[in-house]
Image (tube, rainbow, N blue to C red):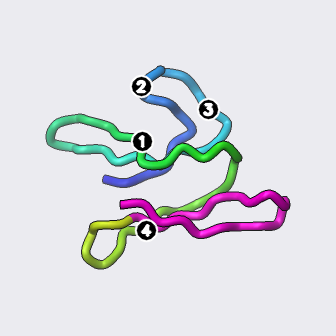
Amino acid sequence: MIYGANYDFEMERVLEPTWLWRHDLVMGERLALARPDKTAYFAPALSPDGQHVIYQRAGEHPSERQVWIVG
């Protein structure tokens, strides 16, 4: 499962920015795929083959949005 959360599961603390997480539901393992510094709303999306995740990040300007991909 892929999702965004304002929580660092490794350090058990609340965050201001939303991090992108991969959660293995069978093993229970969580892996932070992206750790943006700035707060931004995003809805992660899987590529058709399931190999990449596309999400948005905030840019330097308040109205700027960037599209990022992680594998």
Corner quadrant of residue 13 = top right
The x and y percentages for residue 36 are 60, 47
Residue 45 numbered mark, or none: 4
Q: Amino acid at mark 2?
A: Glu
Q: CA distance from mark 1 to mark 3?
A: 13 Å
The question of residue 70 being in magenta is answered with: yes
**Label annotation for residue 15:** 3
Report which residue position mark 1 lands on.
32
Are the two marked residues, 3 and 2, in contact with CB atoms closer than 8 angstroms?
Answer: no
**Which amino acid lies under the numbered mark 3 shown in the image of this protein?**
Leu
Q: Gap between marks 2 and 1, in whole Å?
A: 9 Å
Judge the density around disc 1: few (<14), some (14-19), many (≥20) Cα neighbours within 10 Å.
Answer: some
Of labels 4 and 1, the one closer to you: 1
Classify residue 59 as left or right of residue 12. right
Neighbour class for label 2 at 10 Å: few (<14), some, many (≥20)?
few
**Residue 34 versus residue 51 in the image, above or below:** above
**Which stretch is magenta?**
53-71
Q: CA distance from mark 3 to mark 2?
A: 12 Å
Label 4 or label 3, whichever comes before in sequence order:
3
